[in-house]
Image: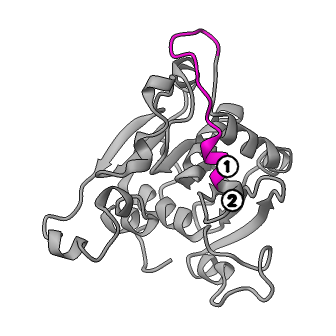
Amino acid sequence: MRRPFPAFDPSTHVYSPINALRLAELSRLVYRHDAEEDDPAPQPTRSHFLDSAGFRQRQFFLSKETGTQAMLVEFAGTAAFTVLVFRGTEQHIKDYLTDLEFGKLSPFGSGKETHAGFTAALDSVWDEIAPAIVRPDGPMFYTGHSLGAALATLAAARQAPRAVYTFGSPRVGNQAFVASLDHVPIHRIVDDEDIVTTVPSEVLGFRHVGTEVRLTAPEHESSIMRVFEPPKPWADHAPVNYVDRL
């Protein structure tokens, strides 16, 4: 966590900018490797940042088969709550294969269909996650960035939390899948021109889930500054930009 944030409100399932900011930071922090993946762990550790924000990591999930990762953290302050945070795409061939194995869906069929790669990725860790989230400490929230956002959405279809906050999510399933999640509060945050939120194409039957919350880049961002950065649609996907613009 980079700075003190206002208190999270676990009692509400409606969109909260403060809750979004806290969950965006967790979605950024889950990318940081710790003892589960690296020995020795990079310093300062992920656990250090969690502790400084009042969180405790209850469990880390890692599939060697698909490279899928997630963490279950709990906040034990005056208003306890639990968050399941999925990691997004890293520069690893397993993640790229997961993203690219999307297939083609039926846009108007009655059967629920989902992205094949995302579904396989969640399947690879779900047997561990499912029992871990049966009795959470306080209300449960799901979150994630990019691929992690897609996995959080799929997880909500298996066991609904109080709310889902996704950041830079690609499309996950067809219209029947979207309709099946009408009862789950899903807040889909999009940073301006984030290119990942435009794929897979609707032509292939994919549709977005949840209520969109659109962020905009600061007016003072100049084209000169962007000469030294990735193209804007890619820069807008960066987790740090989601945190900064919330």
In percent of width and height, residue 209 lies at 48, 32
- Magenta residue span: 96-111
Q: Residue at x 56, y 17 (%)?
A: 176
Structural distance between the alpha carbons of marks 1 and 2: 6 Å
Q: State if disc 2 and disc 1 touch (CB < 8 Å).
A: yes
Amino acid at dot 2: Ile
Q: Residue at x 68, y 40 (%)?
A: 117
In percent of width and height, residue 229 lies at 32, 73
Q: Is residue 109 above or below residue 32?
A: above
Q: Element under label 2?
A: helix
Res. 176 in view:
yes
Image quarter of residue 54: bottom right
Q: Element under label 1?
A: helix
Count of residue discs: 2
Res. 84 in view:
no
Amino acid at dot 1: Leu
Of residues 181 and 175, the one drawn nearer to the viewer in this rendering = 175
Drawn side of residue 173 relative to residue 122, left or right: left
Drawn side of residue 229 relative to residue 203, left or right: left
Q: Is residue 36 magenta?
A: no
Quadrant, the C terminus: bottom left
Residue on which disc 2 sits = 93
Drawn side of residue 132 relative to residue 77, left or right: right
Residue on which disc 1 sits = 97
Residue 113 tag number: none
Q: Residue at x 61, y 66 (%)?
A: 91
Q: Residue at x 83, y 54 (%)?
A: 65
Q: Is residue 189 above or below residue 23?
A: above
| Residue density around tag 2, few if under 14, some if 14–19, many if 20 or more, within 10 Å | few
Main secondary-structure element of the magenta-colored stretch: loop
Image quarter of residue 71: bottom right
Drawn side of residue 38 relative to residue 199, left or right: right
